[in-house]
Image (tube, rainbow, N blue to C red):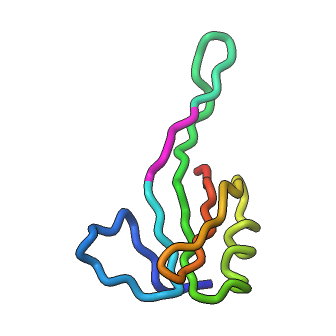
Amino acid sequence: MVSNVYFQPPPDIKMQYPCIVYERDDRFTAHAGNKPYAHMVAYQVTVIDRDPDSTIPDQVADLRFCEFQRTYKADNLNHDVYKLFF
């Protein structure tokens, strides 16, 4: 996959590309019988790569409970954003 992975990197970090950046995004609780029975934490996972045909986004998309959100280009880097539940 990729060896450069950053969790909520501060702005002064110089990231190496390709990389994956992730951060906590949301929390989901399922209820039944007026009681919570399942909890999931959602993370925003962004694959950043110079290569527009990178296979890394496909590998992330294959993860269980992964949902594609959007793609965009910034600073000559391709960003593929996913929501991943655990």
Snapshot quadrant of residue 16: bottom left
On screen, residue 86 versus residue 14, left or right, reads right
Residue at left offset 71%, top offset 75%: 59
Snapshot quadrant of residue 55: bottom right
Residue at left offset 44%, top offset 51%: 24
Instruction: Determine whether 54 is above or below 35 in the image.
Output: below
Residue 54 x/y as whole percent? 69, 85
On screen, residue 10 versus residue 77, left or right, reads left
Of 76 and 55, the residue lying toward us: 76
Of 50 and 21, the residue lying toward us: 50
On screen, residue 12 versus residue 54, left or right, reads left
Residue 81 x/y as whole percent? 60, 62
Residue 38 x/y as whole percent? 61, 33
Of 73 and 20, the residue lying toward us: 73
Magenta residues, as a range?
24-28
Instruction: Determine whether 17 is above or below 74 in the image.
Output: below
Q: Which quarter of the rendering shows the N terminus?
A: bottom right
Residue at left offset 51%, top offset 38%: 27
